[in-house]
Amino acid sequence: MAAGMNSGSDGSPAADNWGRRGFIGAVAATAAAAVVAAPAPASASALSPLSGPSAPPAGRTPRRTRQLFLGTYTTRAGGGTGLGLASYDETSGRITGTGTLTGVPDPSYLCLHPSGKTLYAVNEREQGGVTAIALSAAGPEVLGTRATGGAGPCHLSVHPGGRWLLSANYGSGSVAVHPVESSGALGELSDLATHSSPPPGPGQDGPHAHQIVTSPDGGHVLAVDLGNDTVYSYRLDTKQGKLSQVSYAALRAGAGPRHLTFHPSGRFAYLANELDNTVVVCAYDPASGRLTPGEPQSTGTGEGTSYPAQLLVTREGTFAFLANRGHNSLTRYAVEADGARLRLLDTVPAGGDFPRHIAFSPSQQLLFAANQKSDSVSVFTVGGDGRLSPAGEPFAAPVPVCALPV
């Protein structure tokens, strides 16, 4: 796809953007929440583990396991039937399916509340929504869904204070705010801000908000808009849940900014541009919220568009990783000059087709890649030098577009 062509959040051309993402004609979810506590026999909604390391010898303490949640499209052919539930071994990276939580339509992006007690999912449909899911020893339970006031929400995050949920409506180019109740459930929409200016980039039909995230110091909220080639900076009124725009940063026309990740210092951010196949180091001023983009840099994938999707930065701020969907690879960068510079080191195969989303385990010793088109999740160990090594065989999952290890 040429740079500047209207693109969906999954990198598909405009001609089949809405149909492939399942927004038009999607039936609103009405099923009650149901938890499958253990892997079901072969069925459309069960997640099945692939081959992996053998069980520990008798008498040896089993390795520690943690939870993994998998987002998918429930209205797309071959997609899942709800939120995928799994566990993973922290040492080997082996994933084991544990079932599916139904009643969560098109959960294409997930995030965790700072308390760890509630999970949130977008419902990426024409009538967009966000769903709250309580997490407990008894298993996950759907608390309810609220409308986002726009079409096709594809990203969400919780403000660090834990009182507000932020979401980005890709289809209508707007960002939404919902209050978070003490139970973790969501209140009615408290604000909706639409990206009306600057005008859309070349070949775009309008704004397409693709991400909304809070700066590390909590002072500003930044919204990345692929359609307008712009990153907007807002202040959030943490009492009323209202957004006030304070500045915006314009990328070069046709860049298609998709995903922004901050350096731990809070002084720099790294931006993946979906349409022109570049990454950009941006200076960030915490006092004003102003973002200043630098020069575009290579993704290490050669000529053509590889639809870069997402950047991760290690908590020490020493390495950054980029998922390249068209190239089916992960790029490794060294972070230099206290965060002001990225130096490309190498790329490695992603272990699947179209790595839509990547995520670290809490220890950052593992990296997960959700491969949308090969129905698989790859796991890598992260070395001290940032090198990625495959951890066993990929795990089979229906149209995984988000992997959230907790």
Image (spheres, rainbow, N blue to C red):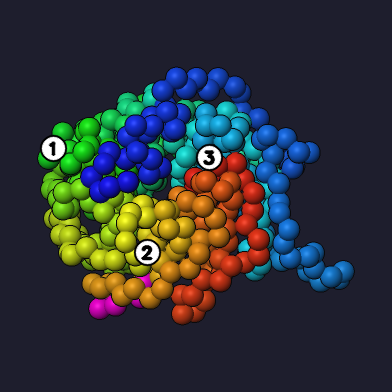
Highlighted magenta segment, given as a residue range: 333-338
| Residue at (34, 38) in percent of width and height | 13
Residue furthest out toward the right: 58
Q: CA distance from mark 3 to mark 2?
A: 26 Å
Choose top left, top right, bottom left or bottom right for residue 12: top left
Give 353 or 406, whichever is nearer the viewer.
353
Relative horizontal placement of residue 356, taking residue 300 as reference (left or right): right
Residue 325 placed where, x, y %? Answer: 43, 53
Contact, CB < 8 Å: mark 3 with mark 2?
A: no
Closest to the camera, between mark 1 and mark 2, is 2
The residue at 17%/64% (across/down) is 294
Element assignment for label 3 = loop
Which numbered disc flags the more N-terminal residue, 1 or 2?
Answer: 1
Q: Position of residue 4 (x, y in %)?
A: 23, 45
> What secondary structure prevails in the magenta region?
strand
Q: The residue under label 3 is which amino acid type?
A: Thr
Q: Secondary structure at mark 2?
A: loop
Between disc 3 and disc 2, whose residue precedes?
A: 3
Q: Residue at x 28, y 61 (%)?
A: 279
What residue is shown with label 3?
Answer: 72
**Residue 301 numbered mark, or none:** 2
317 with respect to 205 (left or right):
right
Marks 1 and 3 sit apart, C-alpha to C-alpha, by 32 Å
Q: Residues within 10 Å of mark 3 (few under 14, many from 20)?
A: many
Per the rendering, the mark at residue 199 is: 1
